[in-house]
Image: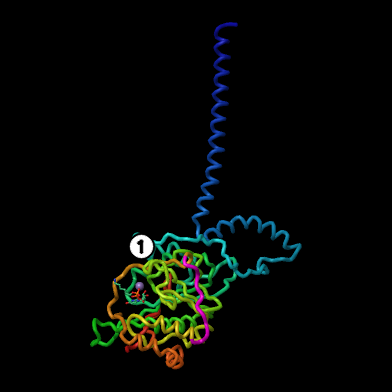
């Protein structure tokens, strides 16, 4: 064979080999890429909030729906006829222990963009099931915007994973209009604000459960359900500031929940505890005097953090509190939700909460 022909066939074989190798390389790269993108998708899904996760699964359902719709003409089952079921006792998206810290700055805009599923006023309902309870979250408030941001940042996703039908109510004690009062502020009245929260929330929706939460308390486990039980519930049982245990057995402060029925049974909360302390013990006395007991989560699930703070202005310890607590049984019938008076000054609907500014009067 002439040299030129030998060279040519060698070149041809080399070229074919290169083409085969290139093809192999591209195939391997493609397979590798596709596998990787699958696991990337799985990772993204793990980061989703329940609503986002549902959006993803719903997209999958769409093709399934096409099939179902074709069948529906035969079996006569339409989409609207498919009834939602009651949400389960163990919601599937709970994660258990949570990392809670207050070092990273949080902005309301960030929290808003993380919670686009909310209806105006900080309202939420699960989409795939009917919530077991309709819960109003009531927060007594004055001048604690920094703490409120963290509360909203941590609690909204937790409450959504708990599959509650809920609304968030910030009951803001108005600055006094009385020019003579010290620094333009009256003494703080936590329990009266909670009563007002109960009354105002009920004007808006048929709530059957009320969670009363300090603005600075964040649960460290999403299995601590912000809902009601067969007995009044104490939720903040294991606070960091008390070394993760109850300070005393009758302690009922921080975060608690009562059904509408339980709340009415004790005539709500006292209206005449001005300044810090005692109102939570009065509420405990009311519950005990009506023969009810306190329900609590265990000390692990009930762990929570309080944002460190100094005592606020116009909220000094109430010197009358010991005397008041000693007479709960005699006073609770005439001081409570049946004797509540106040004036609503302003109602603001944010995406994350309903803020109701109220004039509670003065001691
Ligand atoms: N609150 C306000 N504004 C006030 C006072 C109270 O929003 O000016 C609300 C808020 O929801 C707060 C709750 O009422 O979480 C209870 O008040 P608190 O946090 O002052 O009560 P706590 O027992 O603090 O946590 C006691 C004072 C601690 C001083 C420690 C100084 N080192
Ligand atoms: Mn506090």
The residue indicated by pointer 1 is 102
- Structural crowding at the residue carrying mark 1, measured as other residues with C-alpha within 10 Å and reported as few (<14), some (14–19) or many (≥20): few
Give the residues drawn in magenta, as a range: 289-299
**Can you say which quadrant of the picture contains the C terminus?**
bottom left
Question: Could you say where residue 22 lies in the image, as x and y percent from the top left?
Answer: 54, 28
The quadrant holding residue 311 is bottom left
> Disc 1 on helix, strand or loop?
loop
Q: Is 300 in the magenta?
A: no
Q: Residue at x 55, y 21 (%)?
A: 15
Q: Is residue 169 visible?
A: no
**What count of labels does the image hold?**
1
Q: Is 297 in the magenta?
A: yes
Taking 133 as reference, is 248 left or right?
left
The residue nearer to you, when weighing 121 against 190, is 190
The main secondary structure of the magenta stretch is loop
Taking 302 as reference, is 85 left or right?
right
Q: Looking at this rendering, what residue extends furthest in the front direction?
A: 249
Question: Could you say where residue 262 lies in the image, as x and y percent from the top left?
Answer: 52, 83
């Amino acid at each position: 064979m002439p040299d030129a022909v030998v060279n040519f066939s060698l070149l041809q074989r080399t070229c074919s080999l290169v083409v085969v190798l290139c093809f192999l390389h591209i195939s391997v790269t493609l397979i590798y890429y596709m596998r990787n993108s699958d696991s990337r998708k799985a990772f993204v899904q793990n980061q989703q909030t329940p609503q986002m996760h549902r959006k993803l699964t719903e997209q999958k359902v769409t093709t399934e729906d096409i099939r179902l719709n074709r069948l529906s003409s035969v079996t006569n089952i339409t989409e609207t006829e498919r009834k939602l079921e009651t949400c389960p006792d163990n919601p599937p998206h709970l994660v258990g222990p949570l990392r809670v810290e207050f070092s990273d700055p949080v902005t309301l805009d960030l929290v808003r963009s993380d919670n686009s599923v909310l209806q105006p006023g900080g309202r939420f309902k699960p989409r795939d099931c009917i919530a077991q309870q309709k819960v109003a979250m009531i927060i007594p408030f004055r001048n604690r915007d920094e703490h409120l941001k963290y509360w909203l940042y941590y609690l909204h996703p937790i409450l959504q994973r708990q599959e509650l039908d809920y609304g968030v109510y910030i009951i803001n004690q108005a600055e006094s209009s009385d020019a003579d009062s010290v620094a333009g502020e009256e003494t703080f009245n936590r329990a009266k604000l909670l009563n007002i929260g109960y009354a105002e929330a009920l004007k808006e929706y048929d709530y059957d459960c009320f969670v009363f939460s300090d603005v600075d308390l964040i649960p460290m486990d999403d299995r601590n359900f912000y809902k009601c039980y067969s007995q009044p519930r104490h939720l903040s049982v294991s606070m960091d500031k008390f070394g993760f245990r109850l300070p005393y057995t009758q302690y009922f402060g921080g975060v608690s929940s009562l059904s509408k029925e339980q709340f009415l049974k004790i005539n709500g909360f006292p209206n005449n505890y001005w300044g810090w302390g005692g109102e939570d013990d009065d509420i405990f006395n009311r519950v005990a005097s009506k023969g009810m007991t306190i329900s609590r989560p265990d000390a692990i699930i009930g762990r929570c953090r309080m944002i460190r703070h100094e005592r606020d202005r116009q909220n000094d310890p109430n010197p009358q509190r010991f005397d008041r607590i000693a007479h709960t049984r005699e006073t609770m019938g005439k001081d409570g939700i049946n004797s509540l008076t106040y004036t609503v000054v302003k109602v603001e609907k944010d995406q994350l909460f309903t803020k109701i500014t109220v004039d509670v009067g003065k001691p």
